[in-house]
Amino acid sequence: GENVEQHPSTLSVQEGDSAVIKCTYSDSASNYFPWYKQELGKGPQLIIDIRSNVGEKKDQRIAVTLNKTAKHFSLHITETQPEDSAVYFCAASFMEYGNKLVFGAGTILRVKS
Amino acid sequence: DSGVTQTPKHLITATGQRVTLRCSPRSGDLSVYWYQQSLDQGLQFLIQYYNGEERAKGNILERFSAQQFPDLHSELNLSSLELGDSALYFCASSVGVKEYNEQFFGPGTRLTVL
């Protein structure tokens, strides 16, 4: 079935360190992999996404890598700052009909200053 | 601010009752999605509408229904409410139905069933 697994569930890093969150997905037909950041009391907000024809994408301190063969994708945040503290969700598209997203369980990232 | 609005922000009701959650998509977006977020189930896709028509269905209970109106706003109706329906309900919108169309999420409606 449609499934996205996300690890770790919580991650604590020191300010300035890097953070890595990993996801695996079940459907080899998935072609779109967004990452969302959710702050307390708010809705998820897209921070970066990657399509299956690309192996890596970077936007300032954030990068995402995709290994389609292994059905893995990862989020990398460098030089973490306290404002990066939030819940991060990975997702994968499932296109049977409609472009629904299936989300991972989320990672609580705490950046300690 | 994503441009997606949801009302009400909070809703407290009793078991057995019926409630309606409302969503206005971003200007120009034709597709609306509903998600349920709970501590034990995470963020679960419920249903998608595109330009007034149901497009995809996820883990939506039979007690729940939705529709998208000609002005593109959407409503999610939850009936015969149970304690387990307490959750955050998010609406998202996107311009179309292409796989890579970004989904913009609203601020959510927090439903508490007592």
Image (tube, helix red, strand yellow):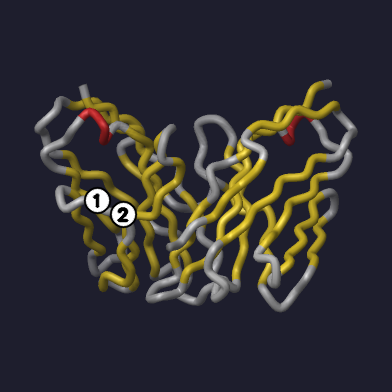
Q: Is residue A35 above or below residue A41?
A: below
Q: Is residue B52 left or right of residue A6?
A: left
Q: Is residue A75 left or right of residue A58?
A: left
Q: Quadrant of residue B24?
A: bottom left
Three-letter code, disc 2:
Asn
Q: Chain of mark 2?
A: B
Residue B7 in percent (x, y) is at: 32, 41
Q: Are marks 1 and 2 on the same chain?
A: yes
Q: Is residue A40 left or right of residue B112?
A: right
Whole-Å distance between the Cαs marked 1 and 2? 14 Å
Element at badge 1?
strand
The C terminus of chain A: image quadrant: top right
Query: Residue at the location (86% across, 28% down)?
Result: A15
Sooner in the amino-acid sequence: mark 1 or mark 2: 2
Q: Is residue A17 above or below residue A113?
A: below
Three-letter code, disc 1:
Leu
Residue B76 in percent (x, y) is at: 24, 51
Q: Which residue is mark 2?
A: B59
The N terminus of chain A: image quadrant: bottom left
> Crowdedness of circle 2 by 10 Å Cα count: few (<14), some, many (20+)?
few
Residue B106 in percent (x, y) is at: 45, 47
The numbered disc on residue B76 is 1
Element at badge 2?
loop
Closer to us: mark 1 or mark 2? Answer: 2
Q: Nearer the viewer, residue B64 or B90?
A: B64
Query: Residue at the location (34% across, 64% down)?
Result: B48
Q: Nearer the viewer, residue A21 or B113?
A: A21
Q: Is residue A11 above or below residue B93?
A: above
